Image: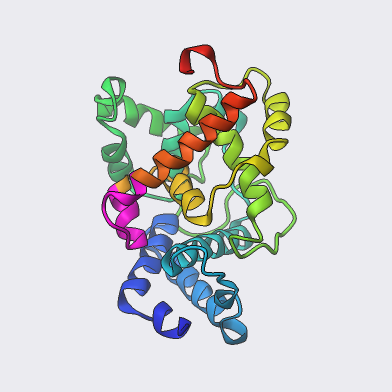
Amino acid sequence: MDWSAIVFDQQTQGRISALCERRFGKTVDAEVASQYVLEKLSADDWQLCRKFTGRSLPQTYLYTLCSNLIEEHARKQYGRIRPPAWLKQLGDTWLTLWKLICLERQPVPAAIERLAGRDETLRNSDGLLDMVRTIKARLPWCGQQTGAVTTEQEPEEEAHTPAAQSDSSIEALLLLLHQVVLKQEPENKAQTQDALNNLGAEFTLDDEQRLVLRMAYVDGMKFSAIARALNLPAHKPARVAKQALAELRSVLQRHNLLPEELL
């Protein structure tokens, strides 16, 4: 497979630039990140790309690979950025807004427009603007386009490929989908995590399913946007997510982890 031709294709270059701009805004940081991704991809005669096993589409594998490299670059530049505990307690809307303006460094008007109208409680953009002011007052670095920010430093990880990240990814995915599928917060997160980790071997999600779930439920992307990003038919991401969630529900039900009202 000619990875050089695939990566330097105009469409692929546009997707890499879009991923970097989504993470860093339209800044010099985004340009530096894009260059970092290209250098890592092409290093050692495209070694990372050549780990592709063919179990998913090349575009799917490349999207995951680029996303991982962008986050690796961000950690090297700023450390690992995590939402503070007080913010987590305020709920999903606050976390999503924090992610848009602090992590992805999107302009405030764009972040508000993206969130406003999702449900009846968010139709008033003034309320979202008040939330932005609160976040920026507590986190002065939020939204800075360059320079270091306050972070929690963690040891560097060397997992670049989707396969190398499978263990940590499945743990995070299981915890996430416990909330997505069950529509509730676990009463005892540590206990729930232990229980779900023991079920890891029963899930047979492939790379494409995991990526679609990640893009939809972690990154908050619409299925139409996922289809464009992965060069898939417009209907496929929704079908992939539906099948994956059905499997997860089935496994959780077999182990009596699904509430009676959802059976």
> Is residue 194 toward the left or the right of residue 185 in the image?
right
Q: Is residue 109 above or below residue 93?
A: below
Q: Residue at x 55, y 71 (%)?
A: 52
Q: Residue at x 58, y 56 (%)?
A: 148
Which is more toward the observer, 137 or 153?
A: 153
Q: Is residue 185 above or below residue 35?
A: above
Counting every numbered tag in the picture gives: 0
Q: Quadrant of residue 20?
A: bottom left
Question: Magenta region: which residues?
Answer: 224-238
Q: Check residue 7 for magenta coloring.
A: no
> Is residue 114 toward the left or the right of residue 35 in the image?
left
Decide if residue 76 is in sight here: yes
Q: Residue 246: x percent and y percent?
A: 46, 34
Q: Quadrant of residue 34?
A: bottom left
Question: Looking at this rendering, what residue extends furthest in the top direction?
Answer: 261
Q: Residue 154: x percent and y percent?
A: 72, 51
Q: Is residue 195 above or below residue 152?
A: above
Q: Residue at x 54, y 30 (%)?
A: 250
Q: Residue 203: x percent and y percent?
A: 60, 42
Which is more toward the observer, 174 or 97?
A: 174
Q: Quadrant of residue 113?
A: top left
> Is residue 213 toward the left or the right of residue 45 in the image?
left
Q: Residue at x 33, y 70 (%)?
A: 14
Magenta stretch, main secondary structure class = helix
Q: Residue 88: x percent and y percent?
A: 55, 29
Q: Is residue 126 above or below residue 25?
A: above
> Is residue 45 toward the left or the right of residue 96 in the image?
right
